[in-house]
Amino acid sequence: MSDLLERLRARGWRLTSQRRVVAEVLAGEHVHLTADEVHARAVARLPEIARATVYNTLGELVALGEVVELSMDGRAKRYDPNARHPHQHLVCSNCGIIRDVRPSGDPLAVLPPEERFGFTVSKADVTYRGLCPGCA
Amino acid sequence: MSDLLERLRARGWRLTSQRRVVAEVLAGEHVHLTADEVHARAVARLPEIARATVYNTLGELVALGEVVELSMDGRAKRYDPNARHPHQHLVCSNCGIIRDVRPSGDPLAVLPPEERFGFTVSKADVTYRGLCPGCA
DNA sequence: TCCTACGATGGACAGTGTCCAAGTCAAGAT
DNA sequence: ATCTTGACTTGGACACTGTCCATCGTAGGA
């Protein structure tokens, strides 16, 4: 994770304690916290951190490509720090737990040219849905 | 679309003018309106229709499987009346326009068993992203 | 035509996210 | 080590989306 901080510093980021805490809270695979969850965990380490700062920092991390923003269910967005390893998501329809998964092959390949409506298609986001072992 | 009204009546729906108007507004392929857009168009035909009624009716249509709910961008949910013909979505990263598309093959097939974490996977929602002809 | 349970209404409320003016501080310059 | 400055943080107000609820209205069967 200090790799991340290094990369951010190299891009001219001012390394504040708030940003450091947000970056630390957001680490690992299969981590998909909402902004408020990030804020709650950040407050545990830095009691006076403001909600707006968490939103700002998450937005910046997304803009820099270090974190991926997910809109799974129309409620709060979730933030996925595993951005450097391309992956898709598997979601339990019952409890909502999310796992990072890696399908084989290129998801773009299955979209035929006549179904592209003249678009320049560059990316495919896939959400697999089903029941997790605990809910099945 | 009167097919839809027939199906709904057959399921015990009371056919009110409000529900009829919502069903009429939501018709066609490549239609992906937000709840407020549906409400605005419904008001044009039935000035006193309430926002809550539109939300209720949309929720019922989704529960009945007649309409698909989309959470594309974390803002307002969109409602897709093309639920009887399975399809995925192609979204312009710039202007946000959405087209219904039909990839070839089964998107579930490319998720290997060892990437399923014990889930019973039943569905895959794919969002293709790129630039539409007007924005490219 | 009448009844009545189901649906509509509209306003209050909650969750999520954005904006802004004022205060604070990281980090380069001296 | 201290100064300086502009980027960053703060906290509260605000906007948008969606939900809830008590009350009123009406579709459709008797």
Image (spheres, coloured by chain):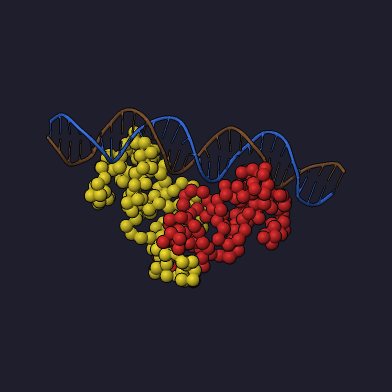
Chain colours: A yellow, B red, C brown, D blue
Residue B37 visible? The answer is: yes
Q: Which residue: 28% across, 43% down?
A: A20
Q: Which residue: 32% across, 57% down?
A: A84
Q: Is residue A51 above or below residue A135?
A: above
Q: Is residue A116 above or below residue D25?
A: below
Q: Nearer the viewer, residue B33 or B5?
A: B33
Q: Residue furthest front?
A: B134
Quarter of the rendering containing residue B25: bottom right
Residue B109 visible? The answer is: no
Q: Nearer the viewer, residue D16 or D9?
A: D16
Residue A32, given in percent of the width and then of the height, sits at 40, 50
Left or right placement of residue A90 versus residue B17 in this view: left
Residue B73, given in percent of the width and then of the height, sits at 46, 52
Left or right placement of residue A13 versus residue B129 in this view: left
Q: Which residue: 43% across, 56% down?
A: B94
Quarter of the rendering containing residue B82: bottom right
Q: Nearer the viewer, residue B65 or B130?
A: B130
Residue A94, given in percent of the width and then of the height, sits at 51, 53
Count of numbered circles on the image = 0
Residue C21, given in percent of the width and then of the height, sits at 37, 30
Q: Which residue: 67% across, 42% down?
A: B48
